[in-house]
Image (tube, rainbow, N blue to C red):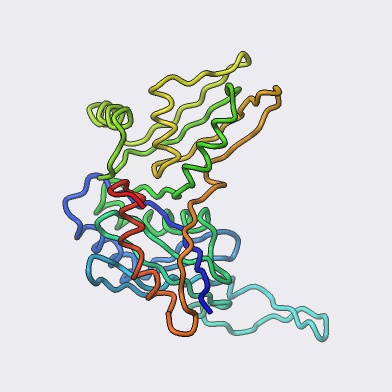
């Protein structure tokens, strides 16, 4: 019987980009360098494998605990602390494997929602940490990682608001995506000023009524290039708080669990999904 695999995505943007091979170099540097990124607490992650074929980069992300090898242990049977337990620092417990596939042309990374899979926020934090290594920052000028959000769902939520008490918009310049006319005009204006990132906060007790330009920035931020935090005023006067990254874009792919491997399913669909997210053709 067929099943569905849920898949989410990140937009990984390099500025400036000399060619598509830059992304392959980036992933190879992180993988070969064995870079590790802290996610939260004792949870860490790294790129466990990295293969390029047909315009796709795919492999496995390792998520694990990184513990203090000098810390005391607990004997739960005796309910007594134990010190001096030798644990090699290079051995990491609680390993989880998460397959991923990255479209080089459209710079989108996809991974499945399976047991122990990281949330979009966790994956964003993981890759931001991996790309913050000194050698990466020396080689590449700017790398931004954004969560792909469900723009249609967010547009529906925003349409219920007659005004806003507060708007907070974070935005990074798009990289090669097809844009609407207002979005393109705004992006060109930022590029002329050599602006790579924008963060704006608006507030009004009387209620903000966004103009065409502000709506264009909101559209960009909720599409692939940032996030929007809003306190919206509904028709009955109540205030509703919305954070765009709480609404990730989720694709559901049909598959046969008895014959299809998860990585194979991702490879089969990623090029189409990445083109869709980049706005290059309809679904």
- Name the quadrant containing residue 178: top left
Count of numbered tags: 0
**231 is higher (above) or lower (below) than 143:** above
**245 is higher (above) or lower (below) than 4:** above
Report the residue at 65% width, 73% height from top: 71
Report the residue at 47% width, 42% height from top: 151
Query: What x and y, as percent, mark residue 209?
Result: 52, 18
The residue most toward the left is 18
- Name the quadrant containing residue 269: bottom left
Query: What x and y, as percent, mark residue 227?
Result: 48, 39
Query: What x and y, as percent, mark residue 266?
Result: 39, 69
**177 is higher (above) or lower (below) than 103:** above
Query: What x and y, as percent, mark residue 55?
Result: 23, 65
Report the residue at 41% width, 73% height from top: 60
Report the residue at 57% width, 70% height from top: 116
Left or right of 252, for residue 269: left
Left or right of 265, for residue 154: right
- Name the quadrant containing residue 57: bottom left
The residue most toward the front is 1
């Amino acid at each position: 019987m067929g099943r569905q695999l849920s898949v989410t995505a990140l937009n990984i943007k390099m500025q400036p980009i000399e060619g598509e091979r830059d992304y392959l170099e980036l992933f190879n540097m992180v993988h070969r360098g064995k870079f590790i990124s802290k996610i939260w607490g004792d949870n860490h992650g790294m790129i466990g494998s990295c293969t390029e074929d047909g315009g796709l980069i795919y492999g496995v992300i390792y998520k694990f605990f990184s513990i203090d090898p000098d810390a005391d242990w607990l004997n739960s049977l005796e309910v007594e602390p134990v010190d001096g337990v030798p644990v090699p620092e290079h051995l990491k417990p609680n390993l989880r494997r998460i397959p991923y596939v990255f479209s080089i042309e459209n710079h989108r990374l996809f991974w499945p929602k399976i047991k122990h899979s990281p949330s979009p926020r966790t994956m964003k934090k993981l890759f931001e940490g991996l790309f913050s290594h000194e050698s990466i920052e020396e080689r590449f000028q700017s790398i931004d990682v954004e969560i792909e959000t469900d723009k249609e769902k967010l547009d529906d939520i925003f349409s219920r608001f007659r005004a806003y008490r507060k708007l907070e918009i974070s935005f990074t310049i798009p990289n090669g995506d097809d844009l609407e006319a207002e979005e393109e005009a705004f992006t060109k204006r930022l590029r002329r000023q050599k602006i790579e990132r924008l963060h704006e906060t608006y507030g009004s007790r009387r209620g903000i009524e966004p103009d065409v330009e502000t709506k264009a920035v909101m559209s960009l931020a909720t599409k692939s290039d940032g996030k929007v935090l809003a306190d919206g005023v509904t028709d009955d006067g109540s205030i509703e708080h919305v954070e765009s990254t709480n609404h990730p874009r989720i694709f559901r792919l049909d598959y046969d669990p008895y014959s299809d491997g998860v990585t194979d399913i991702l490879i089969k669909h990623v090029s189409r999904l990445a083109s869709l997210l980049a706005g290059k053709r309809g679904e």
